[in-house]
Image (cartoon, rainbow, N blue to C red):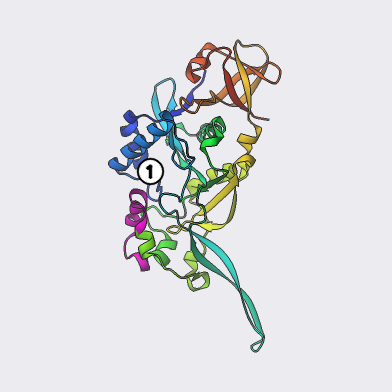
Amino acid sequence: MIQYVMRPSRLSDLDDLMELAELSGTGFTSLPVDERRMNERLTNSDRAFTEAVPEHDSGRYLMMMEHVPTGNVAGCSAVKAGVGIHEPFFNYRIITVAQASQAADKRHDMDVLVLTNEFVGYTEVGTLFVRAEHRGGGVGRLAGQSRYLLMASDETKFGDNVLAELRGIVDDEGRTPFWDCLGRHFFRMQFEEADYLSAVTDNQFILDLMPKYPVYIDLLPDRAIEVIGQCHPDGVGAMKLLEWEGFRYERTVDIFDGGPMMAAARENIRTIRESREVRVELGSDGTPVSGLISNDRLGDFRCAMLDGHLRGDDVIALSTESLDVLRLNAGDTARVWVRK
């Protein structure tokens, strides 16, 4: 029996979403503890799933993970169809500058942080969080991979390139070495305040206060240099999943905590590339397979761990219970990713 299903968020999920925001902790920018902002996210998500959104920069899709036996919310994940279009999406690009002098007979390279808005139009995957008591057994993979099957259900709604932002190093008291040694001097506020503002405003304050010139990394204290491009320990698993999908870190980091930004071409993402459409039938005969299955419908999206039997290459046999959870009928088309 299917234990967990990813489904579109509902306006009635506000209390559960606020609880997930509380549990996610400091530095999880996409889940701020702000009821107005969370209600806005649910409204935008409802609009994306239920209305015809022609441009790929308009959709803000939030999915909730539902524990089927109890109906309780166990986690969430999200897809933002386009970033950096209606409001800036800043990051630091690390570039290497060659320093040379014939007169002094010296040559060395130095890394420099340059403020950019280079991910304009990228689709962003994020907001992946699962309650501790529900982790394990492939649940995190379901929350992560379901985002790619969502994209595959209607590729016209998403960008050609996909971005993922990982939380950087933040200690239990909310301090981050990168912020303390760099951003704090320009913003004159604590990390928590800047992190909150980045989640609930249009980020104009970043443009107003951020240093306009390149920052030489060698001028920063060692404790800040050491965390540049490093993800929070809680995000190591998510980073490995991103790498498995084909995402790569290419020297771009978050401007607040120095966490890594990872990107991939949508068509090269493993789950999308290896998924395929199948016809659904009722039954339990055939070759048993595991993986993921979605109903391949953007407006009423459902995705769960695959518990069925393949009949040839293009037919999947499912139980009545699985059909009900996925809101499928015999004869419908579904999309499967089969674990090899």
Q: Residue at x 53, y 68 (%)?
A: 112
Q: Position of residue 142 (x, y in %)?
A: 53, 32
**Closer-to-camera residue (247/213):** 213
Reply yes or no: does residue 195 show up in magenta: yes
The residue labelled by disc 1 is: 31
Q: Is residue 148 visible?
A: no
Q: Tell me where the magenta segment starts and ends, as one range.
A: 186-204
Q: How many discs mark residues in the rendered view?
A: 1
Reply yes or no: does residue 232 show up in magenta: no
**Name of the residue lying farthest toward the front:** 54
- Residue 171 quadrant: bottom left
Q: Secondary structure at mark 1?
A: loop
Q: Relative to 335, is 192 on the left or the right?
A: left
Task: Work out whether 39 lies above or below 298.
Answer: below
Give amino acid for label 1.
Leu
Task: Work out whether 153 lies above or below 218.
Answer: above
Q: Is residue 104 visible?
A: yes
Neighbour tally class for label 1: few under 14, some 14-19, many 20 plus, Cα within 10 Å? many
Q: Residue at x 51, y 66 (%)?
A: 113
**Closer-to-camera residue (79/59):** 59
Q: Position of residue 220 (x, y in %)?
A: 47, 70
Q: Relative to 52, is 12 on the left or the right?
A: left
Q: Position of residue 124 (x, y in %)?
A: 50, 44
Q: Main secondary structure of the magenta part?
A: helix
Q: Relative to 225, is 170 on the left or the right?
A: left
- Residue 250 quadrant: bottom right
Q: Position of residue 105 (x, y in %)?
A: 67, 86
